[in-house]
Image (spheres, rainbow, N blue to C red):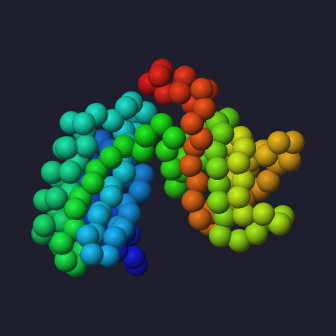
Amino acid sequence: MSHEEKVQDLISPALESMGYEIVRVQISGDKNKILQVMAERPDGKNMTVEDCASISREISAILDVDDPISGAYSLEVSSPGIDRPLVRLKDFERYAGFDARVDMNFLIEGRKKFKGKLLGIQNDKVEIRVKEETFELPFGDIRRAKLLLTQELLDAAATN
């Protein structure tokens, strides 16, 4: 189990009881470690600075006790933002119809990078339409994915 997974397992129950979901936990840096926790509200409403501060206080208290990360680190709590990363299977379903970029770990039909319209999920595969062609990308082989900032996405975010 990675350090990120340990941290996520430790803090998830507390964040869920506060009414939030973890989007991603990431540790970066060697000398100056940064623990980034990205969270969102399951009701789809925008995160506020107060939400992030509240989450940060809760996480700090938990990590001070359990201490899963060796050495000093900085904690950053943020919302996923409008052009958010897509990390969970349900993210690809939720944002079907929007443009995204998906980078794969392995070649799929001769390519690793896909930029197009998300079509949703079919049997644990992410469907994306690139120009006139539809690709089925195995979820477990996705290296990273994120929404692309478009006017359509901005308009949808403005209604939340």
Give the residue at x 27% y 54%. 76
Q: Quadrant of the C terminus?
A: top left
- Location of residue 71 (image quadrant): bottom left
Examine the rendering and report whether any part of residue 123 can be seen: no
As drawn, 1 above or below 26: below
As drawn, 32 above or below 76: below
As drawn, 29 above or below 60: below
Which residue is at the far right? 132
On the rendered structure, is 74 left or right of 123?
left
Find residue 105 and report its horizontal and vertical position in percent: 65, 70
Which residue is at the far front? 31
- Location of residue 96 (image quadrant): top right
Find residue 19 and report its horizontal and vertical position in percent: 30, 42
Examine the rendering and report whether any part of residue 42 can be seen: yes
Find residue 123 and report its horizontal and vertical position in percent: 71, 57
In this rendered view, identify the residue nearer to me: 93 or 157.
Answer: 157
Give the residue at x 17% y 53%. 58
Q: Quadrant of the N terminus?
A: bottom left
Give the residue at x 87% y 42%. 132
Give the residue at x 58% y 54%. 145
Query: Across the whole image, how many numbered discs are drawn on residues?
Result: 0
Find residue 136 and report its horizontal and vertical position in percent: 77, 56
- Location of residue 99 (image quadrant): top right
On the rendered structure, is 111 left or right of 141?
right
In this rendered view, identify the residue nearer to me: 149 or 125.
Answer: 149
